[in-house]
Image (cartoon, rainbow, N blue to C red):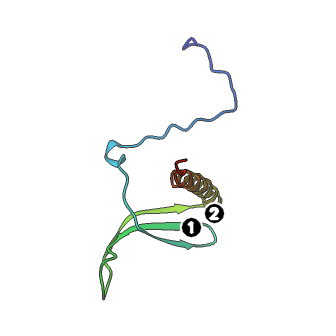
Amino acid sequence: MDEDEPQEETGERRLNIHLDPADIAGVYANFANISFSRYEFTLTFARIEHEVEEGDVPGAVVARVNASPRFIEELMAALQDSWSKWQTTEGIRNLPEAPDR
């Protein structure tokens, strides 16, 4: 396509999300807390030291996300879909070997 030609409108949108190289590895969380109001949900992810026997359990918040109820509904559907696919993959991977005949 010539750069001077306007693009045809197809109605499609494509995400163009930037990720800083410093953030590419992500963060590790082994604990999440969810709170909500009438207008939004807040998901707080933390890394907790589970090996503490008594007293306060140390931890650090690694991310906090505020989102609309509509986004949370879509997130839950996407998580369920991915969980189902993961379970299927793990189930196939863990099938018992067929006995030799």
Q: Quadrant of residue 53?
A: bottom left
Q: Position of residue 60 (x, y in %)?
A: 33, 70
Residue 77 falls left or right of residue 23: right
**Badge 2 density bin: few <14, some 14–19, many ≥20, Cα 10 Å:** some
Q: Amino acid at mark 1?
A: Phe
Circle 1 SS class: strand
Tag 2: residue type? Pro
Residue tagged 1: 41
Image point (52%, 67%), residue name = 42
Q: Position of residue 22 (x, y in %)?
A: 31, 46
Determine which residue is flagged by label 2.
69
Q: Residue furthest bottom?
A: 54
Q: Is residue 3 left or right of residue 10?
A: left
Disc assigned to residue 52: none
Viewer-closest of 5 and 54: 54
The reply to whether callout 1 and callout 2 are in contact (CB within 8 Å) is: yes
Q: How many marks?
A: 2
